[in-house]
Image: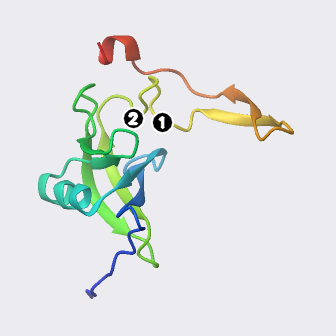
């Protein structure tokens, strides 16, 4: 069964996209996508995102070589978030971890910060990957 889906891009023409490892189910990262990023992802099979800080489209792994091969692109029921099911080459996080979610909250502070514990091992050296 197929149906048409409308995407609810925000005023900046962006939506959040979660990258999830298709085999393990681990959540690897959250980034934002523009309509062009989604189009490039579907056309090439490689994850494309939109950098809010650089104000530009980017392909995951262009610098590091740690690309995401997208197996499926899913959209949520409200059309306001995407899920990229990916096969990740190398680490997904620019800090060297497989996932951007490598810290666990141990204690919340009154100033909206938290004491965290690292719960993963690095899979690459970011200084070497981003020379």
Q: Around disc 1, counting alpha carbons within 10 Å, would you say few (fewer than 14), some (14 to 19), or many (20 or more)?
A: many
Total number of numbered labels?
2
Extreme residue toward the left, this view: 43
Q: Is residue 66 left or right of residue 97?
A: left
Q: Quadrant of residue 83?
A: bottom left
Q: Position of residue 43 (x, y in %)?
A: 12, 58
Colouring rule applied to residues: rainbow
Kindly state the secondary structure of the residue where label 2 is placed: loop
Determine the residue positioned at 46% across, 50% down.
25
Kindly state the secondary structure of the residue where label 1 is placed: loop
**Callout 1–callout 2 Cβ contact below 8 Å:** yes
Alpha carbon of mark 1 to alpha carbon of mark 2: how far? 5 Å
Determine the residue positioned at 32% across, 49% down.
50
Which of the two labelled residues, at mark 1 and mark 2, occupies the earlier sequence position?
A: 2
- In the picture, the disc for residue 99 is 1
Q: Nearer the viewer, residue 58 or 18?
A: 58
Q: Which corner quadrant holds the C terminus?
A: top left
Decide: is 4 above or below 60. Answer: below
For disc 2, the marked residue is: 92
């Amino acid at each position: 069964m197929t149906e048409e889906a409308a995407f609810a891009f925000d005023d900046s023409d962006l939506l959040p996209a979660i990258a999830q490892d298709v085999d393990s189910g681990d959540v690897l990262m959250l980034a934002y996508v523009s309509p062009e990023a989604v189009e490039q992802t579907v056309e090439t099979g490689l994850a494309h995102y939109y950098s809010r800080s650089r104000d530009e489209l980017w392909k995951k792994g262009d610098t590091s070589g740690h690309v995401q091969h997208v197996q499926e692109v899913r959209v949520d029921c409200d059309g306001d978030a995407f899920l990229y099911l990916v096969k990740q080459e190398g680490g997904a996080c620019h800090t060297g971890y497989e996932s951007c979610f490598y810290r666990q909250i141990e204690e919340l502070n009154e100033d909206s910060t938290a004491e965290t514990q690292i719960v993963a091992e690095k899979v690459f050296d970011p200084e070497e990957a981003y020379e």
